[in-house]
Amino acid sequence: MKKAKYVFVTGGVTSSLGKGIVSASLAKLLQARGYSVTIQKFDPYINVDPGTLNPYEHGECFVTEDGAETDLDLGHYERFLNIPTSQNNNVTTGRVYQTVIENERRGEYLGKTVQVIPHITDEIKRRMQLLGNSGEYDIVITEIGGTVGDIESLPYVESVRQLIWDLGSENTAVIHLTLIPYLSAAGELKTKPTQHSVKMLLEQGVQPDILVCRTEKHLAPEMRKKIALFCNVHPNAVIESIDVKTIYEVPLVMLKEKLDKVVLSKLKLSSKNEPDLKSWRDFLFRLEHPKSEVRIALVGKYVELPDAYKSINEAFIHGGAANECKVNVQYVHSELITESNIKHKLSGFDGILVAPGFGHRGIEGKLLAVKYARENNIPFFGICLGMQCSVIEFARNVLGLKDAHSSEMDSATLNPVIDLMEEQKKITDKGGTMRLGSYACDLTKNSNANRAYGKQKINERHRHRYEFNDKYKERMEAAGMKITGVNPATGLAEIVEIANHPWFVGVQFHPELKSTVDNPHPLFVKFIKAASEHRGSNA
């Protein structure tokens, strides 16, 4: 069985520097050189997973094939590497402590006093090596969430220190991502924050091997030498990560900076072939040289924080590049949509996407957006709650069931066209209790969905509690809303479409979670194509 090598990525100075993007970019380069690579994220918060976190707190919750609710960085990993992640790719402090406490309750520590060292750090180290011990990977990249110096990250840094000692320095590499701020008043870049950040890491017993420096301006050779000298790394291990227009340029920047070669040298691995990045460069060319453009309204209630819809935004980028089309996404807050301003809010768009979400807030605005798209023949795409809104709107305004609703929003409605799944009715816990992960779906021949996928059997990822109420299926279909995707095991509706409409598709699952650079999601590709055709017909 192959023995994995480990790369640890820490961050200093400030959060949101892009550890996830640097980790994904490095993994992409190593993968392109022929190595099997995976990335995992260790988050220092005490939630067991992000599933119960407000999107305003943490951005979107990314769902894996096996149904784990994880950090949004796993979306970056999948989009860059084009391979699925699992529950083992994301670990939180909450999950670590939960396991240790459960072990203690079972008496597995034989009466010992349970402490951060060794019990918490041992559990962190065990989880850090789970993917590496599977025999599937040559290299495991581990991103440590938070910023060095935070109290909550201390056990993780200590675990990294111990693992370097356990595994040997030739089997490990530590990358520290820091900021080189530019002070406009002084007209110069400053290295002191990086020096202090490395000093803090050293105080915790970890010497970084490589420094990746986020910067607005290019680092002069003298500055690189200064950073290397003061931070005790080789000059070629000071990597410049300059700001770029799109995150998809970062792998090429890291290639130019030879980050992958420096890492391989540290791990005593050969550089193999030069990385094959032709398809990546082709994608970037299409992205940067579009032949057309469309305007899409994204109607949601978390629009103040774009990260709440991170995967949807990225899927638009992938689908746009596939169509050689620039997708201009404009956020429209569903709470601010009313009968009187709907035309002002949504006129001029080439397509309308009603986004996922939970709870009753902003629901009436979403219903108005669906109605506007349906009545004005504007290409429409509804995802999860967006699909449910399309069903409610159709039931109210076409079937005439004026009180039609989801029992999530109105438990007293006489027409619950969206209702709680049977297996959910006795569940009170919120965390990890929804329908999660990958499920099969059979598509109706010649439907929009079938034409998009080019096949009749698909698998997609879910995250929801409420479903289309099958009691209304016949009436819906007779009136023109067709069920074109069905779960073969349960018979539950997965996709609805309106036949006499240019492109009207609502899906119960989350297609955005499977869109990658190499495999843009077919529904996004076709939605953008439909929006482009709509724009052309109205030109």
Image (cartoon, rainbow, N blue to C red):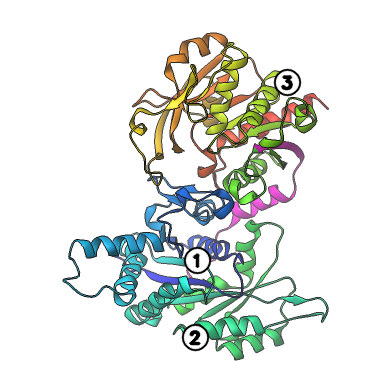
**Left or right side of 422 for 479:** right
Q: Quadrant of the N terminus?
A: bottom left
Q: Nearer the viewer, residue 411 or 175?
A: 411
Seen at 60% across and 90% down, the residue is: 230
Seen at 63% across and 28% down, the residue is: 364
Q: Which residue is the site of mark 3? A: 376
The amino acid on which the numbered mark 3 sits, given as a three-letter code, is Asn
Q: Earlier in the sequence, mark 1 or mark 3?
A: 1
Q: x and y percent of residue 537 in the render? A: 78, 24
Q: Residues within 10 Å of mark 2 (few under 14, many from 20)?
A: few
Res. 456 in view: no
Residue 208 to residue 132: above or below: below
Q: Is residue 237 magenta?
A: no
Residue 228 to residue 183: above or below: below
Q: Which residue is the site of mark 2? A: 202
Q: Which residue is the site of mark 1? A: 145
Q: x and y percent of residue 323 in the render? A: 67, 38
Please say if the residues under marks 1 and 3 sit with CB atoms less than 8 Å apart. Answer: no
Q: Earlier in the sequence, mark 1 or mark 2?
A: 1
Q: Which residues are magenta?
A: 271-299
